[in-house]
Each structure stands twice: as structure tokens, then as C-alpha cells.
């Protein structure tokens, strides 16, 4: 792992509860909505690709960008601020992808799953300043990546979702209360079960939290709730199958994009509205070939996918792609 990689980028990117009909041809394709954007761009520093295991996560806040990933050969969590020199915090060991989320008005929170299933987090700021200490989320364990959403623009409260440890297929959620510096007791999200790590996102326009999961039938299932609501909506199957974790992200104007990974290793994307109704068919990106699902991030009304792509049986290389401009 080269520790000085500079990420030179302006990123372009269960439950059988109900039945669903297939998306009809009356729904426009995502490719039409996205203008056919499908070009994959590689991360470089001095002509060298960033290599990693799995895929990477990024977040923006107060004009700053933080990217985190798992080292290609050492299972460390690596962090880069504003495309600068990569660094580590303490001695981390993880076997899965870390994640980062905006926190407060100008900070970030980095999460990783330790080698014994403990979930750890640490704050990092836009100038790279950090506490140097990883803190555990008490009483919560998984052997898969976690997903975290900021609970409102500029909020210091966070919502975390994960699948249980080992044979525990339940989808769990807990939230961080900044005012008391405590985590709520974890609760299963409306009986949800998943084969892989679930994802969570916050739609700031509609004030909805969304959770996505690969159900035990391998379908994409989604649920959402208004922030602060006493319960989650019923899980809904989307009629498509995914071979990895599905993710979602919201635009500033309320539109959303969801991602899945098909059986051929190609990401697929579709547009939804801010309440979970599908507005497009699924666009298959046949250029990308990845064993890791594409994570999604937003910069206003521009959405990106980040991923680690397989290249000639070498360690995964970091790629990014603009997938959508919200209309």
C-alpha cells in the first residue's frame, strides 16, 4: 500500500412482505435520464492507480472532501483529506470496507468494523485534525461493513445500520445522540433480514431516512421513515436482484438514485423519488466490472458512484463515475 496516494478527483460517482410488478416499458430508462453517462475514470497520483481492497467511501462537508479505504495488503483504514497524503489513525485492523459520513457543520465521522466484530468510529476534520482515538459503538457487532447517515443538514446526530454478526441476518439500526454523547439501544428495523450489509441514506429534502437491503431472496428491499417517526414503513421488494449490498443517495432537490450489483459484476442504477417510488428503469453499466457494490455520494444535485474495479487479477483499483445530474 502506498501511503502517499493523493486522490486527484472531482468525483462524477428478507422479507416477503408484499409483491411488486416488474418495471414496465412506460417508465423511462435511467440512461435517458442520466444522458448516457457511463465513463469510468481512474484515480491517479503520478500515474499510479490507487489500489485497495473492496471499494472506498467519501463524504463532503463545508467544502472539504474525505475519502477512506482499506489498504491493499495491510487491512489498515486509510484516510485522505482534500486529495492529500493518506494517513492512518492508530492501529486499525479491518477485513471489510470502512465508511465516512459528514458530521456537524464542518466535520466527518469515520467508521470501521474491527477484526472481532466491534464497530469503531473517530472524528476527523477538514484540516485533517483528529482525536487519534477510535471509540466503540457499545453493544453493536457485525462482521460486515456498516452504513451511516447524517440525520439532517449540519446535524451532529447520526443513524447507523448493519447486519448482525455471523449467522444473525437481522438488519439493525441505532443512532448517535450528540447532545448526550450516547448511542441508542439497537433495534431490528421492522423485522428486516439481509444476506449482505444494508445501506442507509438521508433525503434532506423530504426528511426521510432510507434503508436498503439484499433480502434473503436476493431481491432489493427498501424501507423508509420520516425522521423521528415512531416506526418504519413496511419493507418493499423492488423486483430486481442484487449480488451485493444495495445503496441509495438523495439529491438536494429530493430525487434519489439506488444502486445494485448484478450477477455479472456490473453496477445498475435507477431513479426514485424522495418517498421511495421508482421513476426509471434500471440502467446497467457494462463498462464497470467489480466484485464490490458501487457506493453512492452526492454533491448537491450531482451524484457519483465510487468502486474498486478488478483489473487483470491485480489488487482492486479505485474508480469513480458521475452517474446522475438531478433534474
Image (spheres, rainbow, N blue to C red):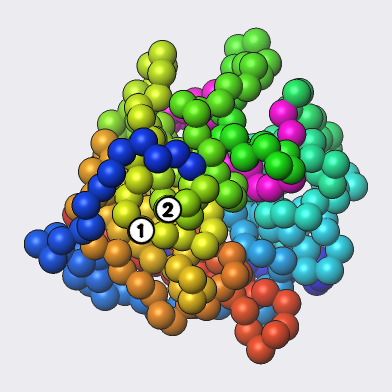
Eyeballing the image, is 245 above or below 2? above
Q: CA distance from mark 2 to mark 1?
A: 6 Å
| Residue 284, picture quadrant | bottom left
N-term-proximal mark, 2 vs 1:
2
Q: Which residues are magenta?
A: 140-160
Q: Nearer the viewer, residue 121 or 212?
A: 212
Residue 215 percent location from the top left of the image: 49, 47
Eyeballing the image, is 269 above or below 161? below
Q: Is residue 119 visible?
A: no
Question: In the displayed structure, does residue 52 sit left or right of residue 19?
Answer: right
- Residue pointed to by mark 2: 219
Q: Nearer the viewer, residue 57 or 226?
A: 226
Residue 240: which numbered mark, if any? 1
**Does dot 2 land on a helix, a strand or a loop?**
strand
Question: In the displayed structure, does residue 292 sit left or right of residue 76?
Answer: left
Residue 9 percent location from the top left of the image: 53, 67
- In the current view of this chain or complex, which residue is farthest to the left? 26
Question: In the displayed structure, does residue 51 sit left or right of residue 318?
Answer: right
**Does dot 1 land on a helix, a strand or a loop?**
strand
Q: Residue at the location (64% across, 16% down)? A: 185
Q: Residue at the location (66% across, 64% down)? A: 54
Q: Residue at the location (59% across, 50% down)? A: 196
Eyeballing the image, is 266 above or below 324? below
Residue 191 percent location from the top left of the image: 50, 28
Residue 152 located within the stretch drawn in magenta:
yes
Q: Nearer the viewer, residue 193 or 151?
A: 193
The 10 Å Cα crowd at callout 1, few under 14, some 14 to 19, many 20 or more, is: some
Which quadrant: the N terminus? bottom right
User: Does the CB distance between marks 2 and 1 fall below 8 Å?
Assistant: yes
Q: Residue at the location (53% across, 54% down)? A: 245
Residue 287 located within the stretch drawn in magenta:
no
Which quadrant: the C terminus? bottom left
Amino acid at each position: 500500500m502506498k501511503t502517499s496516494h493523493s486522490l486527484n478527483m472531482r468525483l462524477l460517482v428478507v422479507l416477503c412482505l408484499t409483491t411488486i410488478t416488474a418495471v414496465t416499458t412506460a417508465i423511462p430508462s435511467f440512461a435517458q435520464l442520466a444522458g448516457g453517462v457511463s465513463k469510468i475514470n481512474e484515480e491517479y497520483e503520478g500515474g499510479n492507480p490507487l489500489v485497495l481492497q473492496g471499494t472506498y467511501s467519501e463524504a463532503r462537508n463545508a467544502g472539504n472532501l474525505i475519502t477512506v479505504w482499506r489498504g491493499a495488503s495491510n487491512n489498515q483504514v486509510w484516510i485522505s483529506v482534500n486529495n492529500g497524503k493518506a494517513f492512518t489513525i492508530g492501529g486499525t485492523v479491518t477485513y471489510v470496507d470502512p465508511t465516512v459520513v459528514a458530521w456537524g457543520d464542518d466535520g466527518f465521522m469515520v467508521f470501521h468494523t474491527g477484526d472481532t466484530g466491534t464497530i469503531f468510529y473517530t472524528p476527523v476534520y477538514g484540516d485533517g485534525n483528529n482525536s487519534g482515538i477510535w471509540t466503540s459503538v457499545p453493544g453493536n457487532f457485525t462482521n460486515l461493513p456498516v452504513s451511516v447517515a447524517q440525520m439532517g443538514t449540519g446535524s451532529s446526530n447520526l443513524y447507523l445500520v448493519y447486519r448482525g454478526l455471523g449467522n444473525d441476518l437481522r438488519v439493525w439500526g441505532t443512532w448517535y445522540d450528540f447532545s448526550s454523547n450516547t448511542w441508542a439501544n439497537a433495534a431490528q428495523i421492522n423485522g428486516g433480514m439481509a444476506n449482505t450489509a444494508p445501506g442507509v441514506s438521508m433525503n434532506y429534502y423530504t426528511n426521510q431516512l432510507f434503508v436498503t437491503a439484499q433480502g434473503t431472496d436476493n431481491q432489493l428491499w427498501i424501507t423508509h421513515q420520516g425522521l423521528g417517526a415512531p416506526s418504519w414503513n413496511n419493507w418493499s421488494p423492488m423486483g430486481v436482484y442484487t449480488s451485493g449490498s444495495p445503496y441509495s443517495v438523495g439529491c438536494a432537490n429530493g430525487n434519489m438514485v439506488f444502486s445494485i450489483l448484478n450477477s455479472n459484476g456490473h453496477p445498475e442504477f435507477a431513479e426514485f423519488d424522495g418517498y421511495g417510488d421508482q421513476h426509471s428503469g434500471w440502467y446497467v453499466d457494462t463498462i464497470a466490472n467489480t466484485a464490490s457494490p458501487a457506493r453512492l455520494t452526492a454533491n448537491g444535485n450531482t451524484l457519483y458512484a465510487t468502486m474498486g474495479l478488478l483489473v487483470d487479477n491485480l489488487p482492486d483499483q479505485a474508480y469513480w463515475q458521475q452517474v446522475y445530474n438531478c433534474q
